[in-house]
Image: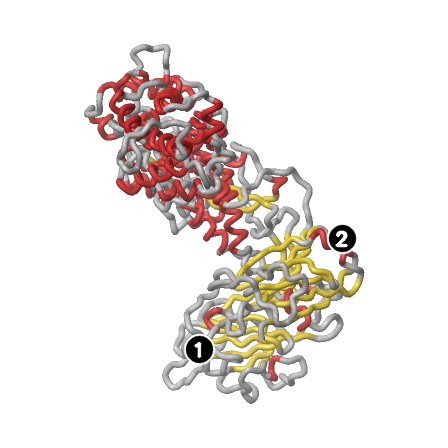
Amino acid sequence: YLSFFVRREFDVSDPSEVGGLFLNMIYDDGFVAYLNGEEVARANMGDLIRPNYRSKSARSADGDPDFGLFEITKSKDLLVPGINVLAIQLHNTSITSSDAILVPELIHRDFYPGREYDRINDIDSLQKLIHAQGMFSKKQLQAVMGEFWENHFTTDYDKTAEYLDDLEDSLGENAMFEQQAEQEAAHVEFKEYEFFRDHAFDAFGDLLLYSATSPSMLIYLDNVINEVGEANENYAREILELFAFGVDNRYTQTDIEELSRCFTGWQIRKVRADKTQGFPESALNPPTQPSTGFFDLPIVDIGSGWRYFKGMREPVRYREGLAPEWTRVGFDDTNWLKGATGIGYGDEDDNTVLEDMRRRNEQKGYSSVFLRRHFTLPAGTEISNLVLSIDYDDGFVAYINGKEVGRSSSMSDAGTPPRFNETASQNHEAGGEPDDISLARYERFFNPFPEPNVLSIQGHNVNFTSSDFSVLPRLVSRSVTQESIEPGDPNGQWAFRFNPADHDYTAKIIFEGTEWEMRIPDDRQGIEGLNDALDVIKMMANHPSTREFICVKLVNKFVADKITLRTYKDGSAPAHLSDVVDRAIDAWQQAEPIGHIGTVLAAIFDRSDVSNPFWTQSVYQAKVKTPVEYINSLGRAMEWGVMLDDLPEISEDMGMHFFTRDDPDGWSEYGFDWVNTGAILERLNFATRLTRHNNNKYLRSWSIRRYLRLHDIETAEEIIDHFDQLLFNGSLSKDTRDLILNFARTAENGRRIVLSPERDDYLSRVGELIGLILAIPEMHYQ
């Protein structure tokens, strides 16, 4: 059959208290959802007003099922006090489809007061923004510098999205679907780019500090897993090599190791929108607590009251596929042993020690233990807040009133229920983070106050000779603290967090034996540990290596390729380019504040000094544009209302795709790296398509006839003169002009023609002529 239909009744005491209403769906292939008889959401079902049981889904969910969060707040007036009904019909694309899935959740979400803020929709929109800023911004240099800093402090949207997609909420469940993770990753990248653009001319120290505390950077270079005792060197290495000093420029491997310990505990968390901090407060006084703080009210705690059975045989007759009798409330366990949790051996966390469990000598041992504990829910308990929190070694399966509610991954293939002599598939040591299982979805399994309930657990060891075994279960009612926000709450924003518990407070020495040596003391406590890295960043911002590296890179960006950090330092760089770098470094040191990028650029561009190499012919058009620069320069120069939709893909075809670079070195600032056959061919194709007379999908309201009339040009010579002035300031050589004119006067069959409005192909030929002008070598240079 093609479809199935499900419905679920639920109770609402007061509909007026419902803020936002959302339908959280996993589905394959299509569905229609109804609330109290009215349609509220659908996907992949086309325009069918009311699909019947024979209707097919309009689209297949290829591979994995689709995920979606459907806001249905506008339909919350359908809710009534008392019993309501959510009904869903699920449809497959064909009767032979290999799968079908439906996992619905109806969510009530409060809307918190707070300021509104801009949010980017997706990574494609962010990549379009790079082109929109480059083409349409009235602050052109600022747009270019925003792009420069985003590339210099490069991060990777894909890695951020993967990290967020893997997060768990406070109940140990997936915090968000892939779609939300991708949107939030795009927004994290957007906030970083927005800062770099808005503060493009500020002090380099501010840019460096912001990047170090940016959630996307903390994820990208793995500082979120940089902890005391397990230091991760990735960010420490790259801040020296790529972001501040430059490769092998006055630092050692020891400096990387010491610096990595300074950055331990630098992590991220989500904060409410109204609790976000501006920079530099966000870096200097970040939150120290995790996104979600909570307190647990124990219902079943570690301790007495348990009955247990040693797994030398089945406690009852084994029945495959059914929860065993011993897990039910009415089972008689008076012959079972009494004990207190933890139960086990060898872990020094056991109140009840099982001396005979491990196989040794003549002792056969056993691999499992069965436990039961009666309890009564306190009056008024919100079952949606109940969590089974269990620490264990090596596996477990848990039941409430005869129904399985969870098992460890080490028991995933152990059968239902696992037999008494089953072993866990892998080791799992107790003493770490417990497995937290939300019991909200199992509300119907519980008996309300004052009726009895039973929590049952079977624990399994990895083998009969294992050195230890533990079962430490707690059943708690979990409430979040007032400042908490779940990682999956889309109303929050990601921010820098300093975690004192993961920071290395031991003494450190950076740049030992140099005049820039820094000694980090071992007497800092709590949030004071943040200063370990803050002090180093502040020093690095005006270190001679940083001045050299950044100024050389700015000269590479705006002046010429023929100088590197190495050639500048060893004196082999062209003298006029070394002179520009010297001017920039002098400006850096004399600026207020030190390292003010606007002051540095003013020195590079200084037009009042006739000897300034920037304005000499030797560096005019000395650099090939990057793909983004080439695309944006066409759009800005022509003022034709370029449509942005396809530009990120076109830039990628030319070899450059912002926000998704895997390597931390950023896209090359050297023009010669962008000169290759494939990339140049893509540029020529784009220029040709951009000026096409018919079916032009890149220019809004493009009309060659109107453009020619507007500028009072008609002949090939007039068109060439116009674009020579517009694009090249009248600098095209005679040879280049003759080449273009020869093209205009030659038909496809090789015959000589006169480009005239009387020709039927006049407009298409003019489009081709303009496309050629946009593709000549001169157009590819800055």
- Taking the spot 65% from the left edge, 85% from the top edge, the residue there is 332
- Taking the spot 41% from the left edge, 34% from the top edge, the residue there is 760
Q: Position of residue 668 (x, y in %)?
A: 32, 36
Q: Quick one: which residue is furthest to the right in this view?
A: 81
Can residue 549 be seen in the rendering of this structure? no
- Taking the spot 51% from the left edge, 45% from the top edge, the residue there is 122
Q: Where is residue 534 in the image (x, y as percent from the top left)?
A: 44, 34
Count residues near mark 2 (Cα–Cα under 10 Å), then give few for <14, some for 14-19, many for 20+.
few
When the figure is inspected, residue 630 is found, relative to residue 108, above or below; the finding is above
Q: Mark 2 points at which residue?
A: 17
Question: Left or right of 594: which side holds 407?
Answer: right
Q: Where is residue 9 in the image (x, y as percent from the top left)?
A: 72, 68
Marks 1 and 2, how far apart in space?
49 Å
Relative depth, front residue between 471 and 590: 590
> Which secondary structure lies at badge 2?
helix
> Which secondary structure lies at badge 1?
loop
Q: What residue type is labelled 2?
A: Glu
Q: Mark 1 points at which residue?
A: 423
Count residues near mark 1 (Cα–Cα under 10 Å), then give few for <14, some for 14-19, many for 20+.
many
When the figure is inspected, residue 63 is found, relative to residue 353, above or below; the finding is above
Question: Left or right of 320: which side holds 264?
Answer: left
Relative depth, front residue between 714 and 771: 714
Relative depth, front residue between 515 and 275: 275
When the figure is inspected, residue 69 is found, relative to residue 533, above or below; the finding is below
Name the quadrant of the C terminus: top left
Q: Quadrant of residue 750?
A: top left
Name the quadrant of the N terminus: bottom right
Q: Of tags 1 and 2, which is closer to the observer?
A: 2
Question: Left or right of 52: which side holds 190?
Answer: left
